[in-house]
């Protein structure tokens, strides 16, 4: 026999044993009643009738203040967040330079303002300077008191 025919025979045995086990397992375990689906019939006018296996309580249809109050009891309402820090003057100036330089150039181009060389240079320098200042001040390194091995930092 070739290796291919051996593989085919093994697959046939696997499939045959799979079907046998599936039939045996279904005979041992009855189908639970909660899994049964009610058969719905459609009336001649095309509308489906209400399902008979679901009890319908008229009190469920009425909205009640106590029901809404009971729903709110389980929800977590976080405390208000603390106010944002003001930031120092250098950070605020960097943000103004980062957005102010390009904003001025865009506004000047849209309104056809005369743009001399020193104005364009100042706007571009403000953008680059603001960006570099904010990146340098990010402080992405480990805290100074973390020691030689900070482990899993969250």
Image (cartoon, rainbow, N blue to C red):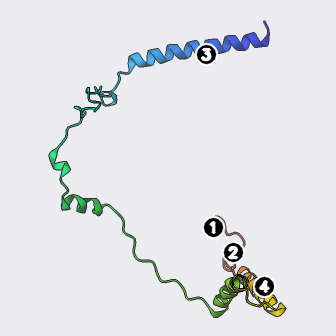
Where residue 12 sits, quadrant-wise, is top right
Where residue 37 sits, quadrant-wise, is top left
Nearest to the observer: residue 33 or residue 103: 103
Q: Which callout, 1 or 3, points to the residue nearer the camera? A: 3
Q: How far is mark 2 from mark 3, CA to CA?
A: 57 Å
Give the labeled residue for mark 4.
Answer: 124
Q: How far is mark 1 from mark 3, CA to CA?
A: 49 Å
Callout 3: 10 Å neighbours few (<14), some, many (20+)? few
Query: Picture coordinates of residue 100 (x, y %)?
Result: 68, 86
Where residue 109 sits, quadrant-wise, is bottom right
Q: Quadrant of the C terminus?
A: bottom right
Label 4 near label 1: C-beta < 8 Å?
no
Q: Which callout, 1 or 4, points to the residue nearer the camera? A: 4
- In the rendered view, would you say 15 is above or below 112? above
Which mark, by number, is residue 142? 2
Q: How far is mark 1 from mark 4, CA to CA?
A: 38 Å
Q: Which callout, 2 or 3, points to the residue nearer the camera? A: 3
Q: How far is mark 2 from mark 1, CA to CA?
A: 9 Å
Query: Picture coordinates of residue 27 (x, y %)?
Result: 39, 16
Query: Picture coordinates of residue 64 (x, y %)?
Result: 18, 58
Which mark, by number, is residue 5? none
Label 1 near label 2: C-beta < 8 Å?
yes
Callout 2: 10 Å neighbours few (<14), some, many (20+)? few
Label 3 near label 2: C-beta < 8 Å?
no
Give the labeled residue for mark 1.
Answer: 153
Could you say whether the residue bearing mark 4 is in a helix, strand or loop? helix
């Amino acid at each position: 026999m070739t290796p291919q025919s051996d593989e085919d025979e093994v697959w046939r045995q696997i499939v045959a044993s799979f079907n046998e086990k599936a039939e045996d397992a279904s005979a041992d375990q009855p189908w639970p009643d909660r899994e049964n689906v009610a058969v719905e019939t459609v009336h001649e006018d095309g509308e489906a009738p209400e399902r008979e296996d679901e009890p319908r309580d008229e009190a469920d249809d009425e909205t009640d203040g106590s029901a809404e109050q009971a729903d709110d009891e389980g929800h977590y309402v976080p405390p208000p967040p603390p106010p944002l820090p003001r930031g120092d003057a250098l950070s605020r100036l960097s943000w103004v330079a980062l957005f102010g330089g390009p904003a001025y150039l865009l506004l000047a181009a849209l309104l056809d303002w005369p743009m001399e060389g020193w104005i364009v240079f100042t706007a571009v320098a403000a953008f680059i300077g603001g960006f570099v200042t904010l990146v340098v001040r990010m402080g992405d390194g480990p805290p100074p008191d973390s020691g030689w091995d900070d482990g899993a930092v969250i």
